[in-house]
Amino acid sequence: MLTPVNPTSLDRTSPPSRTDTGRTLDPALPEGVRIRLLRAVYGDPRAAAELLPRLTPRQAAGLDPLPTEPASLAPELLARHRREIRALPDNTRLLLLLAAADQYPVATHAFLRAVAAARLDTRPLEAAETSGVAHATAGGVVFRDAWTRIAAYETGSPADRRDVHRLLARVLRAEGETPRRSWHRGAGALGPSVRLTAELRTAAQQARDAGEHPLACALVERAAALSLDPREQSRLLDRAAGDAWQSGEGDRARRLAAATDSDALNGVFALRAGNAAESFDALLTAVARCEPAESGADLRPASGSTEVPRTVAAPRTPAPDHAVHLLVRATEAAIYTGDLRRCREAAAVASRVGIVPHGTLGGLAAAFEGRYEDARDLLKAAAGRCGPGGDPTLLIHAGIAALMLGDHTRATTATVRAAASARARGATVVVAQAMEFRAYAEFWTGHPRAAETATADALWQAHATGQDNGACHLQAALAMFAALTGDGDVCRERAAAARSYALGRGLGLPAALAQWALAYLDLSSGRFAAAAARLRALAGFGPGHGHRAIRHLATPHYVEAAVRSGDTRIARAAHADYDRWARAVRSSDDLALSARCRALLAPGDEAVEHYRIALDLHARGTRDFERARTELLFGGALRRLRRRTEARDRLHTSLEAFESFGAPHCAAQARAELRALGTPVAATALRTPGAPTTCLTAQQLMVARMAADGATNREIAVRLALSPRTIDHHLRGVFSRLGIRSRIELVRLLAEGEAS
């Protein structure tokens, strides 16, 4: 009997409605489980309500993959739909079966051709339309919903299903339809077949090269079902798991991988949704074995120009490109844990295997050892590989290298191109990861609101594709955006969520980033001792808790907090190391921040020249947010030196910048300095008629739009992974900023703003 593959992600590309999300699922469920569960059941609240109580405790906690087969997702709902289909006339059911087979689990768009080839009468479809099950259009049959389509397929007898698959295979003869024709040939097979297995495997590679990973997964999984060789079945399921992962079907990938024993697959899954230290060990084991390219653990997005030809019987010879990609993943594991010493271990394994690793690995190892000039050269080589159309994973590493070098323009270019290349290759899973590292470049370049919105979208994508570790990193990034825009409650809530998850998975990177966000919130609110204490601890807890790279990036903030709280001894040592790195990489922004640190540590008039040097360097860089902070600190120093006119100019410049960035805490500091000069400045009018988007933070705007759509505070809280109390705080802030008192006024204002 044909066992249908789970429907592809084509039906699951956008978030379910906030009403279904809010009313169906227990808010105590982890956000990732909620999103994946709703996605698995096509956003149907009935199916979600049926599936939820049947989850195991480990599934409900996100530790085990969710069910993927329709019969496991909502058997009662499916049974009701089947009864409805069985009540229709035989000839109507046959047409619905043909239409369903044409759409599920692989969309082939051949229904009308099949009807014409078999000379079928389509008038019986009127019965389906009368019952509300489906209706005919010029392009074919449209089912009422996904579950009706599945029921129409599964209600057919095995013989009828084989017949319709064979019919569809006969009419799929156009150019580019070979993989889909092979799918139907395989689905119409009576039993195991060596010839069909080989055909399906070849068709899967064609689909993979075209970036159609869901189709490739279906083909390879069907090939495994038709194979009699257990070892070949294991290899094929391994490959299917890789395709499922690339297409964003994380639960399906993990279930398929359970039937294999691939260190590489287990390493990647642990990297994105498990313990990152265990991921490093598994990936390095796979590198040491130097698995052949046939392995499904080769999780690179397909590309016709770089794909190594695969044959099931390939000898176990080294596959350098494959091993390089595994090393890249191992490097990511070291980055996520914060245990950068392990980069040296990875480099040693690479040397033994006889491959040249990507420059990011060597650069990290050299930086950890204090060999800054060597690190600079290696990282520059890696960052230079950010041309369009490259491998998405290597583009992400180019972005990471650029971030370490302080080159935010190149980091943004590399990560944007990584996301574009991933989409073009059908590698849905890589898109959210690109945004994780793009967020760093967005922190300080003066666009926190727009970046916050994009990061929130990437957070949903990470959860939906089963990448909860990446979601944790994005959650920490959102905490930083909230710190920059003065949303204290959101910053603390997101940082707490990120740290709680990160500490349980050994993820030092998001744990440290969340701590940095809290420290910046303290710093911009005048709590200097608290900020200094948080920043001192960034690397003090060891791998999995802190992160040396984040501590390094946060050094300018630590120096400011330490100086303003009266503790400069450790700050001077931290600055000395930061300055050595800045001089090695020659980044204008890093040199500017080093000069600012020197100004903060210098006495009286001596600081002025350092501030001027810092601003000259800022003018050549991209970190506009930090430039405004330098202006603020310089203005305060000039005020204390009684250089009132220049102080006033500097402070006004910083105030205007912070207001344009939407950073009220920093703007309040500039106003306080101006008041100390005897120059009171009224708060900028918050309401801009007809344009509410200009005076709300990105988070406030999302909340406002959902509220205007009729969502309750609890529904909004579930969708944004925040507490109802925080949503209430946001709405009060929205009403205050817009000068309104009701949701009715909010609906009107947003409508007017969009119209204008």
Image: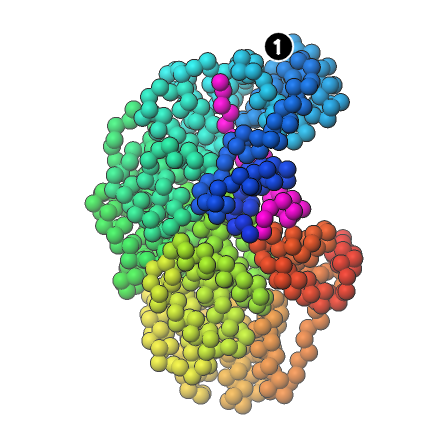
* Residue 87 picture quarter: top right
Q: Residue furthest top?
A: 119
- Looking at the picture, which amino acid does disc 1 mark? Ala
Give whichever of 137, 224 is nearer the camera.
Answer: 224
Residue 482 inside the magenta-drawn segment: no
Provide the secondary structure element on which disc 1 rests: helix
Q: Position of residue 726 (x, y in %)?
A: 61, 62
Residue plotted at (57% across, 68% down): 488
Instruction: Please say if 573 is above or below 621.
Output: below
Q: Which of the 4 image quarters holds residue 172?
A: top right
Residue that label 1 marks: 118
Q: Residue 28: horizontal and vertical position, in percent? A: 55, 52
Residue 627 visible in the shown view? no
Give the main secondary structure of the magenta stretch. loop
Q: Compare residues 148 and 57 and report the one nearer the observer.
A: 57
Q: Residue at x 39, y 38 (%)?
A: 299
Give the residues in magenta. 1-27
From the viewer's perspective, tell me whether residue 564 is left or right of residue 73.
Answer: left
Where is 564 relative to 247, above or below?
below
Quadrant containing the C terminus is bottom right
Residue 542 against residue 107 in the figure, above or below: below
Q: Residue at x 60, y 46 (%)?
A: 25
Can residue 681 be seen at all in this image of the molecule? yes
- Graded by Cα atoms within 10 Å as few (under 14), some (14 to 19) or many (20 or more), the crowding at tag 1 reads few
Q: Residue furthest bottom?
A: 642
